[in-house]
Image (cartoon, rainbow, N blue to C red):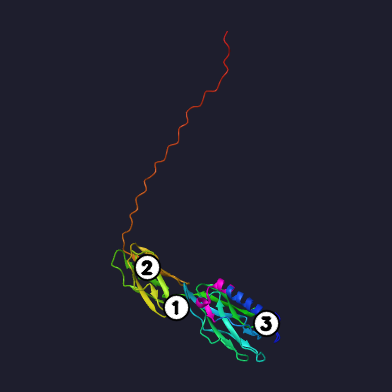
Amino acid sequence: MSRITTGTTSRSLLKLAAVAGYVILMMASLFGPPSSRAQSSPAVTPVTSILTVSPGTLNFDFQVVLPPDGVASSPKNITLSVAKNQTQPVTIASLIVSDPVQFVIQANNCTVIQPGIPCTVPIIFKPTGLRKRSAVLAINSNASNDNGVLSVGLVGYGKAGTLSISPGSLSFPVAQVAATPTSSKSVTLTNKNAVQLTISRISSSNPDVFLLTNNCPTTLQPNARCTFSVSFMADRNGAIGGKIFIADNAAGANRVNLSGSGKNGPTPTRTATPTRTPTPSPTKGPGPFPMRAFPVMH
């Protein structure tokens, strides 16, 4: 875009103001009223100064997500500035983010940018889902460049939080079949994420053999832990396996492997297999007599 000089006519300024007003209305129609979506100020008269923004894209690191909640990042800044040789300050009409839930503008004083005095706008990233998340920050001002509208790309990534399970397996000693349950063994669940974790269910794959006592809440706060315990009651001789399943909104392992063995249970009695009487082979009878030629008697 061409730069507007000091000799810009009043007609050109009015035309520029009309274009800037149209852009602001268009952004409001796309993203909602500025009062609920962005930092904004009243419309202002265009000036000849040029506004610059840096960087052109703001990249955030991976942030942990336990859907639908994500961990908020540390703020990262964009810088708004007007060169020292410009004659007029630039007024920021609005800062509008296309996704204000995941990319949140923090409090700042960037309303009027004086020449030679840059101003920073902090933004945090709080993902609501996994993988790449992106948005656009639109900066509406009365600057002469780009019709007073500049933009910055916002990019971040969400990664799944995990649940710590310790130990990951339990082994029980050999137990008498049909005896009372063995002493219980405990498993500890720890939420090492900076956001709360939801546990919807903890269940045993074989509840009559591996008896579960669950002391965990449905919501595990950051850095909190809980325990559940399992005991073993053999129902047959030999090795017996099972699992404890943990249903939650975290990624990674969600089960505990179980093993035990039973002894001195009833031994199944095998039913004797009846002796099979052989079927006699059929006796072959005499075959048809051969035809013989007899002499003709006269």
CA separation, marks 1 and 3? 55 Å
Q: Earlier in the sequence, mark 1 or mark 3?
A: 3
Q: Nearer the viewer, mark 1 or mark 3?
A: 3
**Badges 1 and 3: C-beta atoms under 8 Å apart?**
no
Q: Position of residue 265 (x, y in %)?
A: 31, 62
Q: What's the amino acid at mark 3?
A: Ser
Q: Earlier in the sequence, mark 1 or mark 2?
A: 1
SS assignment at label 2:
strand
SS assignment at label 3:
helix
- Quadrant into which the N terminus falls: bottom right
**Foreground residue, 266 or 191?**
191
The residue depicted at 53 percent of the width and 84 percent of the height is 75
CA separation, marks 3 and 2? 90 Å
Q: Is residue 213 in view?
A: yes
Q: What's the amino acid at mark 1?
A: Val
Magenta span of residues: 26-41
The residue depicted at 59 percent of the width and 80 percent of the height is 139
| Residue 195 tag number | 1
Q: What's the amino acid at mark 2?
A: Gly
Q: Earlier in the sequence, mark 3 or mark 2?
A: 3
| Residue 260 tag number | 2
